[in-house]
Amino acid sequence: MNLRRDVFQAIADPTRRAILLLVASQTMTAGAIAANFDTARPTVSKHLQILTECELLEQEQNGREIYYHINAKKMKEVADFIEPFRKMWDDRFNKLETIMKKYKSKK
Amino acid sequence: MERKTKIDAEDGKQELVITREFDLPLELLFKAYVEPEIVEQWMGTKVLKLESRKHGSYQFETSDAQGNVVFRANGVIHEFVPNQQITRTFEMENAPFGVQLEFLEFEELTNDISQLKMHVVYRSVALRDQLLQLPFAQGINMAHNRLQDIVSKLKNPL
């Protein structure tokens, strides 16, 4: 399994989370994004590459410039990622509750 | 009255807490964790062994319609205090997730309402996040597929 391009690995990094926050409010070029960080430009580029590869960011060519913007759909998936796990336990526990209610009334 | 399961999984931590209130007296909730035939029903797996005592161990196994084993898990029980607490390990066999430590706390809220708090500690943050994604990720590897099967089975009514 390739973990490096995993969305959750991607957002585990604080710089990448900061980039996502920054780009969330407006579409930006790589240069404009890099200007917000003390990190070296190639490092920011690498972060942008990772975020783009796991589809959290999307690129848009506009003349000579490449603009980055948030992929809202992917972001929503990440925000909701815990829900199926919660649902799994909720279903189990609902079942447990139903079984034990019957068990109680049998007695 | 509908009672909801809550998951607290703080960012960057290798643990999570599952909390749930049950419309059940404490004794009945605890019984559902101790009686093998009851565990089988709500967990949707066969219980091969369940020794509910300190130093006891347990083994679960699920087979598909053709009788192939699709899921097997085991663990040991470290602490067993009736109607209060179970501390145990849990490990899926033939899966890359390793062992996890589970602290189960049972509490009486009223005569008819009880609460379970399940504190789960994983080996690493990455492993926790991977396991959280399991029901969500599709077909990344065999273990994922197996769990998907189990989850979809659990969704069917009894």
Image (cartoon, coloured by chain):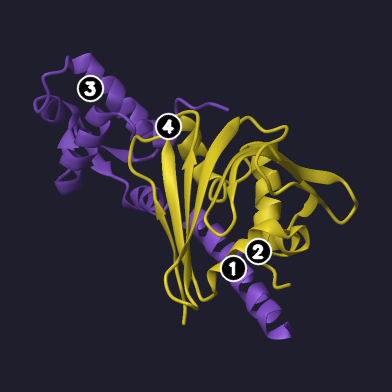
Q: Chain of mark 1?
A: B
- Judging by the rendered image, the residue that carries numbered circle 4 is B125
Residue B31 bears which disc, if any?
2
Q: Nearer the viewer, residue A65 or A19?
A: A19
Tell which tag, 1 or 4, sits nearer the viewer: 1
Q: Quadrant of residue A99?
A: bottom right
Q: Nearer the viewer, residue B82 or A86?
A: B82
Marks 3 & 1 on one chain:
no
Callout 3 touching callout 1 (CB < 8 Å): no
Task: For residue A62, say whether it is visible.
Answer: no
- Judging by the rendered image, the residue that carries numbered circle 1 is B27
Residue at coordinates 16% horizontally, 17% vertically from top-left? A39
Q: On the rendered structure, is B5 left or right of B139? A: left
Amino acid tagged 1: Glu
Give the letter of the yellow chain. Answer: B
Q: Secondary structure at mark 2?
A: helix
Gap between marks 4 and 2 measured at Cα = 32 Å
Q: Chain of mark 4?
A: B
